[in-house]
């Protein structure tokens, strides 16, 4: 069935990272082994990927630094030989002129650089990195190299927005514009540790997205705005419009507040961890914890199989995996993001609606608060 084929394959080359960012889930991983994907396993995965007729993109990323893998250039080259688009995300610390040229020659189509000017910290105390200045140098080098090697190659910027750094977003957007970025992807921070809840920019939006479907249907009026200069509107007025539960339209653009929508499942994405485990999404890639409405939740990672034991396409089409995708598309999970704490909220094992593991009612990606390339 063509509509149910894997379109985007995320590969985690390694679970290592040379940074220790304050907002990163790696700080709260539970019983997670640190390791690198063995090249024999990677080539097994590439052989299996050849059988994926609907595959469009291979993305090297996860919750670590892909450039930490010593064979990442070879990995990019091998993936490109599948005849698909190849993307990679990096914190930028390894991206010197030679590495960038090697990635482009290997066939990299899209480089994402994660920029967080306020909180990037290297785990190596001998490295002192200014996120913004480092990003400028990287993107300048990328522009020079792509003009010479592959003018069609693109780059994007990923930014995690918090109260402590949101004022820097215009600077990041301007940098992307000057350097020719294809996209600036902004995500909210997820509070993996209790004190990070103070950094959230979306506490009021939990109630806006509410779980009463009849209320949402009856109240979701379209606010059709003309094109205007936002800087001429009083801040309070603009805030009330954009924070409303309604759909805002300006020209041909619609600002629609999605809820209960998992793009990983809806867009036929799949993750393969460094050890071969096949996971459905970013949120379920590792054992970790997070805070939701001031309640600590344990998030157990989910795997539907390992490519060492069964081909990826067989895992994808297994009864268990297909059943999970069906549940996610229906999204009849309990509304943990807006509900008061209950006995089921402290884990993603099950929920008060009777859904089995893994439950997704407390997922920040499905509510549109978190997003990644």
Image (tube, grey):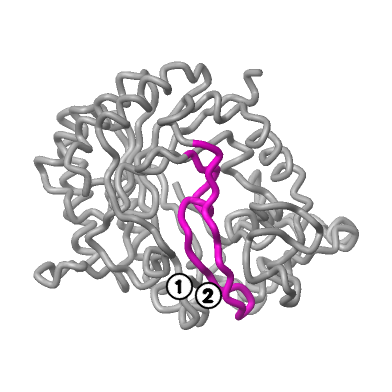
Q: How dense is the environment of label 2, judged by Cα within 10 Å: few (below 14), some, or many (20 and up)?
A: some
- List x then y, in percent, for residue 39: 25, 32
Relative horizontal placement of residue 341, taking residue 48 as reference (left or right) = right
- List x then y, in percent, for residue 371: 51, 54
Q: Which residues are magenta?
A: 278-305
Residue at 34 percent across and 61 percent down: it is 172
Rendered image: mark on residue 200: 2
Quadrant that contains the N terminus: top right
Q: How dense is the environment of label 1, judged by Cα within 10 Å: few (below 14), some, or many (20 and up)?
A: many
Residues marked 2 and 1 touching at CB (< 8 Å): yes
Relative horizontal placement of residue 131, taking residue 352 as reference (left or right) = left
Pointer 1 residue: 162
Decide which of tag 2 and tag 1 comes sooner along the chain: 1
Closest to the observer, 30 or 170: 30
Q: Tag 1's secondary structure?
A: loop
Rendered image: mark on residue 50: none
Tell me which corner region of the image, top left, top right, bottom left or bottom right, holds residue 259: bottom right
Residue at 40 percent across and 38 percent down: it is 276
User: From mark 2 to mark 1, how far is it between C-alphas?
Assistant: 6 Å
Indicate whether 243 appears above or below 350. Answer: below
Magenta span contains residue 281: yes
């Amino acid at each position: 069935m063509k509509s149910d084929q894997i379109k985007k394959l995320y590969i985690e080359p390694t679970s290592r990272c040379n940074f220790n960012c304050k907002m990163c889930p790696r700080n709260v991983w539970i019983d997670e082994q640190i390791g690198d994907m063995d090249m024999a396993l990677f080539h097994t995965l590439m052989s299996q990927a050849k059988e994926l007729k609907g595959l469009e993109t291979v993305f090297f990323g996860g919750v670590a630094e892909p450039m930490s893998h010593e064979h990442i250039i070879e990995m990019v080259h091998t993936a490109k030989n599948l005849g698909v688009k190849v993307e990679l995300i990096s914190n930028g610390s390894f991206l010197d002129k030679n590495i960038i040229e090697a990635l482009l020659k290997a066939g990299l189509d899209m480089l994402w650089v994660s920029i967080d000017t306020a909180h990037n910290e290297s785990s190596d105390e001998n490295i002192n990195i200014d996120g913004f200045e480092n990003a400028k140098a990287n993107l300048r080098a990328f522009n020079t190299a792509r003009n010479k090697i592959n003018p069609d190659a693109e780059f994007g910027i990923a930014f995690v927005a918090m109260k402590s750094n949101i004022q820097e977003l215009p600077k990041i957007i301007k940098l992307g514009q000057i350097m020719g970025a294809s996209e600036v992807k902004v995500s909210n921070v997820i509070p993996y540790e209790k004190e990070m809840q103070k950094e959230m920019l979306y506490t009021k939006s939990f109630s806006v997205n509410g779980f009463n479907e009849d209320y949402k249907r009856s109240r979701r009026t379209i606010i059709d705005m003309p094109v205007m200069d936002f800087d001429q509107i009083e801040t309070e007025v603009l805030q009330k419009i954009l924070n409303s539960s309604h759909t805002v339209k300006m020209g041909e653009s619609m600002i629609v507040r999605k809820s209960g929508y998992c793009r990983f499942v809806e867009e036929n994405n799949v993750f393969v961890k460094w050890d071969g485990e096949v996971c459905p999404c970013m949120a379920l890639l590792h054992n970790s914890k997070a805070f939701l409405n001031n309640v600590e939740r344990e998030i157990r990672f989910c795997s539907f199989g390992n490519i060492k034991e069964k081909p990826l396409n067989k895992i994808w089409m297994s009864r268990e995996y297909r059943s999970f995708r069906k549940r996610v598309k229906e999204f009849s999970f309990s509304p943990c993001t807006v509900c008061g704490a209950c006995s089921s909220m402290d884990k993603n094992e099950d929920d008060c609606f009777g859904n089995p593991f893994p439950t997704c009612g407390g997922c920040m990606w499905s509510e549109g608060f978190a997003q990644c390339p």
